[in-house]
Image (cartoon, helix red, strand yellow):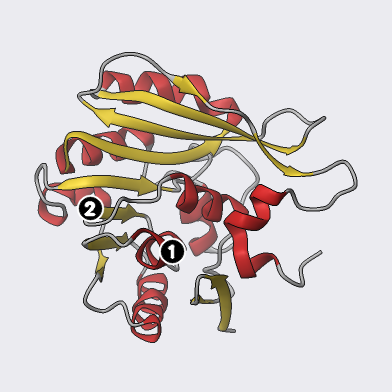
Amino acid sequence: MERWEPLGSGVGVLVGDQHGFGTDTLLLADFSMPRPGQRCADIGSGCGVISLLWCARGRPAKVMALEIQEEAAALLSRSVAENGFTEQLRVVLGDIRDYKALLPHQGLDLVACNPPYFPAGTGAPAAAQARRLAREDHSLTLSDLAAAARFALKTGGRLCFCLPAQRLAEAVLVFHAAGLEPKRLRMVQASQDRPPYLFLMECRRGGKSGLQVEPALILRAGNGEESPELRRICGDYMKGRP
């Protein structure tokens, strides 16, 4: 069943039973926010939350939302029209492994991706095909993402992504080897007394070594209430939710 979810900033997104989003996607949208006039790509865009929030809050010149699943791309296309972003945001149905045919060579300032969190065959199994593609890296490995981002980004261009905390060392190795130097890191904790469960990372194409570690993003206070930063990032999406 389809439904409309408000995201804040006057923007909403159409989601379905197999194509939705979580808090992690909203955190990445904020972490990766483009500067006005930049050219960007949201790889594995799903229902398009990151692309839509970029257009509403970041004022990029152009955004490409690349998605391999036809149903998710169709939902996003309708959200683009409903939000009035048809001149700014282009939805592309395709496989990132065909990046040379899909992405502009060294033509982008920013690439973001909320990739599958688990290598194929690991993690809790998902029954539906759409869920498996979103959770396991059958069609989008970290090496696939690194190759595509290196091809598409200008020198100094940014790649932003999020992954479970236990994959931090793996990600640093993969992207450094591809010439995408990790430059900015932020760990995410459910609460002050819990260990990080997620990290947000920014890499630069051709960047020099040197990693800036930002203060942890704490989602909830000791009493269970959302932190001020979480409320700022998530906007209307948090209203009325436990």
Relative placement, left or right, of 211 versus 225 is left
**Which residue is denoted by mark 2 in the rendering?**
38
On the rendered image, what quadrant is the N terminus found in? bottom right
Relative placement, left or right, of 110 versus 32 is left
Circle 2: residue type: Gln
Q: Neighbour class for label 2 at 10 Å: few (<14), some, many (≥20)? A: some
Taking depth in this image into account, of 24 and 226 the one nearest to the observer is 226
On the rendered image, what quadrant is the C terminus found in? bottom right
Circle 1: residue type: Leu
Which secondary structure lies at badge 1? Answer: helix
Q: Neighbour class for label 1 at 10 Å: few (<14), some, many (≥20)? A: many
Rendered location of residue 184, percent (x, y) = 43, 28
User: Residue at image x 34%, y 30%?
Assistant: 203
Q: Which mark, by number, is residue 187? A: none
Taking depth in this image into account, of 140 and 213 the one nearest to the observer is 213
**Which residue is denoted by mark 1 in the rendering?**
53
User: Residue at image x 67%, y 30%?
Assistant: 196
165, above or below 130, in the image = above
Which secondary structure lies at badge 2? Answer: loop
Q: Residue furthest top?
A: 209
55, above or below 198, in the image = below
Relative placement, left or right, of 182 versus 98 is right
Mark yes or no: residue 126 visible: no
Q: Residue furthest right?
A: 223
Rendered location of residue 21, percent (x, y) = 56, 62
**Disc 1 to disc 2: CB gap under 8 Å:** no
Separation of marks 1 and 2 at Cα, in angstroms: 14 Å
Rendered location of residue 148, percent (x, y) = 22, 41
Rendered location of residue 164, percent (x, y) = 58, 35
User: Residue at image x 66%, y 34%?
Assistant: 197
